[in-house]
Image (spheres, rainbow, N blue to C red):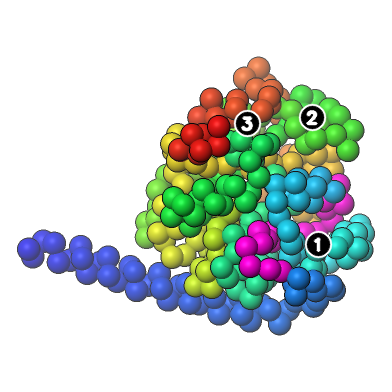
Amino acid sequence: MSKGRPSAMRRAWSAYRQRWKRRKLLWRCMKASRALSPLVDRTGAIRPGDILCFATVRNEMLRLPQFLDHYRKLGVTAFLIVDNASTDGTDRFLRDRADVSLWRAAGGYRASRFGMDWLGALLLRHGHGHWCLTVDADELLIYPHWDSRPLPDLVAHLDAARRPAMGAMMLDLYPQGPLDRAEAPADAPLTEQLPWFDAAPYRCELVHPKRNRILRGGVRERVFFPDDPRRGPTLNKLPLVRWDRRYVYVNSTHSLLPPRLNDEYDGPGDPRLSGILLHGKFLPDSAARAAEELRRAQHFIDPPAYRDYHASVARAPVLWHEGSVRYRDWGQLQELGLMGRGDWFTTAS
């Protein structure tokens, strides 16, 4: 018995610390709401049962038309977007979209926990009780049968299974040639512009005390961090959540509090229903954006440590190699073990 008590005490202490961390982050989000200036607020039209999409954007005109179209077709009924001082017309474009509510945030992206304080404020105010997608403008969520079973069907299935969230792996797509040359016009589907990806290797690590996962691997690790893979990007996310005002994202959408939410996804090989975030980071503007990031230093906790990475992307390298796989469809990703179907197949077939 005496040996078990310290472990129980440590668990209790850890749970106490995580509750306080969650409260501190929620307080940050509440304070961050004062930094948001509404440009157009259509949230009064949100109805119970609506599926909401939250995003922070900056100079995303190359991606926004396909982003909005993709999620509308999936069943998103309202977009709540924070614009972080765009200069390419992103804000003007979004203001004219009838299903978009838009706020401006002029503060630093890194200082706002990479936009999560701003989005946390909106999730706290508008997300409670809704299924909410929190994604970047270069991320398109797909899942088994997504082309025939939209999000209302998916979230009904998750509700029936008593699952509060669905995880997804971020899959970097890239062209066969240099990064400043897509393989199809800008109005073509993302998977035609950037049709290649790395099918393996990927590895997922469980981290205490938040029980969050860290999934690494793929093309960016292979090309940019071969000698220090632990500096490679984290690829697991929890983008789809039935939101509760007690929830808060900790590190982008990679992890959540309370910790039990992080148990909803174990990365590739997890047999439960999960998704893929098709990642359009490497469209032809990626080199110019990396050059800008060298100046702005807003996308990493320790920006100087990633100067070489951004400098490499700014040179528009070739990421393709003989092991690259050409994207076909969601079934291919399922066959490769990159996303699971759970019992969704039996109910969706």
Label 1: state its secondary structure. Answer: loop
Left or right: where 121 falls relative to 57: left
* Main SS category, magenta section: loop
Residue at 52% across, 69% down: 244
- Which residue corresponds to mark 3? 330
The C terminus: image quadrant: top right
Instruction: For the residues labelled 1 and 3, say whether their Cβ atoms are less than 8 Å apart.
Output: no
The alpha-carbon separation of the residues under discs 1 and 2 comes to: 27 Å
Looking at the picture, which amino acid does disc 2 mark?
A: Glu
| Front of the two marks 1 and 2 | 1
Q: Which mark is residue 192?
A: 2
Residue at 41% across, 52% down: 263
Residue at 66% across, 28% down: 329
Left or right: where 97 falls relative to 241: right
Label 3: state its secondary structure. Answer: helix
Of the numbered discs 1 and 3, the one sitting upstream in the chain is: 1
Left or right: where 93 falls relative to 320: right
Q: Is residue 50 magenta?
A: yes
Q: Which mark is residue 99?
A: 1
Front residue (pair 110, 123): 123
Looking at the picture, which amino acid does disc 1 mark?
A: Asp
Q: Which span is picked out in magenta?
A: 46-64
Q: Residue 71: x percent and y percent?
A: 73, 49
**Label 2 neighbour load within 10 Å: few <14, some 14-19, many 20+:** many
The reply to whether residue 224 is visible in this rendering is no
Front residue (pair 181, 189): 189
The reply to whether residue 176 is visible in this rendering is yes
Front residue (pair 95, 311): 95
Instruction: For the residues labelled 2 and 3, say whether their Cβ atoms are less than 8 Å apart.
Output: no
The alpha-carbon separation of the residues under discs 2 and 3 comes to: 14 Å
91 relative to 333, above or below: below
